[in-house]
Amino acid sequence: MNRNKEITEKEYDTYINERNFLTNAKLQGATSFAKAILTLSAGALGFSVNFVKQVFPKIEPYSKKYILIAWIGFGMSAILILISYLLSQYATSEGIKVLEAYYYDSNEIKNKYNVWIRFLNIMSILSFLIGAASLIYFSFINL
């Protein structure tokens, strides 16, 4: 916000309401994303274990590495999202410190956890996609 601009109390209230709405929307989106990735990863891991046992009783020896990569990808995706959840708690606490430093001390500091959370979320998606691609390739080889 441009601190040199004079704003009315009504404009400020509108700004705060919109900011709160957008912050809540972002939080709900992040929570939904994390739940979706965790559900998909755990479901894909469980499904693929049963799928391999029932559909592919005889597995091509050279294809075992692909199912292993798939399981590692799904497992890592779930683990990374769980770590992201934990860091989100730290980020919230850090966010409070950032706000207090800005408003009480006029210090502008960054929330160091946000970068890590974004990185973990991206890595979780990539791990899931690697797992899914490996499972598809494994299935293709063994059909």
Image: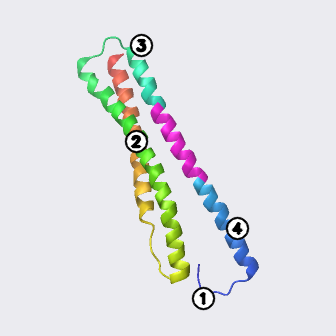
Q: Main secondary structure of the magenta part?
A: helix
Tell me the distance, in whole angstroms, between the alpha carbons under discs 3 and 4. 54 Å
Per the image, label 2 sits on a secondary structure element best described as helix
Residue on which disc 4 sits:
17
Q: Residues within 10 Å of mark 4 (few under 14, many from 20)?
A: few
Q: Residue 4 carries which label?
A: 1
The x and y percentages for residue 101 are 50, 77
Tell me the distance, in whole angstroms, between the alpha carbons under discs 3 and 1. 68 Å
Magenta-colored stretch includes residue 38: yes
Instruction: Looking at the image, tell me whether mark 3 or mark 1 is earlier in sequence order.
Output: 1
Mark 1: amino acid: Asn
Instruction: Looking at the image, tell me whether mark 2 or mark 1 is earlier in sequence order.
Output: 1
- Left or right, residue 14 beside residue 123: right
Q: How crowded is mark 2: few (under 14 residues within 10 Å), some or many (20 or more)?
A: some
Residue on which disc 3 sits:
54
Instruction: Looking at the image, tell me whether mark 4 or mark 2 is earlier in sequence order.
Output: 4
Residue on which disc 2 sits:
79
Tell me the distance, in whole angstroms, between the alpha carbons under discs 1 and 4. 21 Å
Mark 4: amino acid: Asn
Mark 3: amino acid: Gln
Q: Quadrant of the C terminus?
A: top left
Instruction: Looking at the image, tell me whether mark 2 or mark 3 is earlier in sequence order.
Output: 3
Which mark's residue is nearer the viewer, 2 or 3?
2
Specify the segment rendered in magenta. Answer: 28-42
Tell me the distance, in whole angstroms, between the alpha carbons under discs 4 and 2. 35 Å
- Whether the residues at callouts 3 and 1 have beta carbons within 8 Å, the answer is no
Instruction: Looking at the image, tell me whether mark 1 or mark 4 is earlier in sequence order.
Output: 1
Residue at x 26% of width, y 27% of height? 65
Corner quadrant of residue 11: bottom right
Which mark's residue is nearer the viewer, 1 or 4?
4
